[in-house]
Amino acid sequence: MKKRYYAATALICILMLLAFALASGYFTRTSPDNSMAVGFIYSEDESTPYTYNFTQGQRALAEQYGRRVRILVQSNVHGREAEEPIRDLIRKGCRLIFINVDTEAAAQLCAEYPDVQFCQVSLPGIDPKELPENYHTFNGEIYQARYVAGVAAGMKLRALMDAGDIRPEDAKVGYVAANNSAEVVSGYTAFILGVRAAAPEAVMRVRYTGSWSNYSVEKNVARQLIEEGCIVISQHTNTIAPAIACEEAAAKGNRVYHVGYHQSMMDVAPSTALVSLRTNWTPYILSATEAVMNGHTIESVVPGHVHGRDISAGFDQNWVQLLELNKQLAAPGTEDRLNRVIDSLKKGKTEVFRGNYTGVNPDEPADTIDLKAGYRENKSSSAPSFRYILQDIIMEEN
């Protein structure tokens, strides 16, 4: 009788262990082919330039590691809804998850899953130092690429002024911006400083859309800026709408040029796309995967500027890139000058946020900065921090 009782008890224990293993994803994490499951959480899908650009790193991972990795993807994940998609990837065996969504879910879940490495594009207010060691952040020093693209735009304005096609007071730049966060302000400030390196007469009008991805609003804002006389239009939003607006305006006889973000706009705006820039996520994705595969800490393997468990890099590590320059539109000598500027940035010889400018914090007008002393962006974090609006040069409108 006792033997049957013990046998039944043992069977119940085995079943309970099996149920726990299945629920925790143990069997999916230990794949029979020894591949490692890597997850990606995307805020949108590949129809938007931001996510399309990020998937280039995912594709590079598949190409480099082949069957050694199993890639699982969750797309169109909104911040407040990110917890369940992350848990789903973990249940399916992911040991490493890359996240480009603005969400606190990863920071909240990392303690619950200490054997999973969470790698998230950096967000203001989330500091890895305050979280478990399996939470990491990363970002490209994109201000460098915006500055270089600005030089290309400035050279175009300079050429138009020198040819008498526009007056100095017509050297106006328009910027379609999502919001007035430090990420956006830092980017458009670097851009206009690049423009003014070639065309000191240039000024910029910034208009906010209130959203990262809203095609109709972005297009309408770009149209307004063009109608107000902006000759160059750039953007920090996630659709191709500003490029389309430029192309349609040019077809009606407007003189306008576009500087894109995340992807080349040459295919959608061939007669107005001057140049584009992007963050290259591939170096981080490949190196972080290599680290986890080999049991190393991510920050000991990924090349870049390490700030604890946070990493950034610029042109020096190929984390930011300038995309195809439209040589049919660019001013003579643009390509050579851009190469020189990029080389200088790689060597740390060019300080972008420096000059005879005064910036004002829009949230605290008493807080100002004199850029004669310079400002080093991404000095201690991969998240951009420059938050000042340059007086007399940048006009921002909500």
Image (cartoon, grey):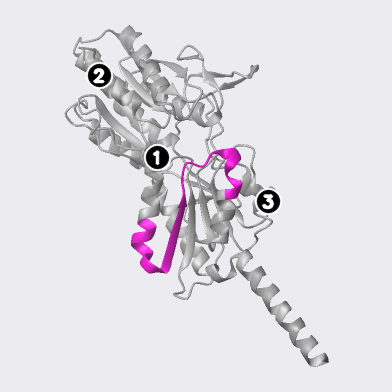
Amino acid identity at mark 1: Leu
Element type where label 1 sits in the image = helix
Residue 233 visible to the viewer: yes
CA separation, marks 1 and 3? 32 Å
Percent across and percent down for residue 395 are 47, 13
Q: Residue at x 33, y 60 (%)?
A: 63
Image height check: is 360 above or below 91? above
Say which quarter of the image contains residue 70: bottom left
Identify residue for label 2. 248
- Mark before the other along the chain sequence, 2 or 3: 3
> Which quarter of the figure has residue 287?
bottom left
What residue is drawn where x is 20% and y is 9%? 164
Q: Quadrant of the N terminus?
A: bottom right
Residue 63 painted magenta: yes
Please name whichever residue, 307 or 52, is drawn nearer the observer in this view of the structure. 52
In the image, taking residue 367 as reference, residue 263 lies left or right, namely: left
Q: Give how far apart the Cα atoms at labels 1 and 2 are.
A: 35 Å
Q: Residues within 10 Å of mark 2 (few under 14, many from 20)?
A: some
Question: Vertically, is 60 above or below 335?
Answer: below
Quadrant in the rendering for residue 112: bottom right
User: For the residue carrying disc 3, how many other residues have a C-alpha within 10 Å: few (<14), some (14-19), or many (20+)?
Assistant: some
> What's the mark number on residue 265?
none
Residue 345 marker = 1
- Going by the numbered disc 2, the residue's amino acid type is Glu
Q: Are marks 1 and 2 in contact (CB under 8 Å)?
A: no
Element under disc 2: helix
| Residue assigned mark 3 | 131
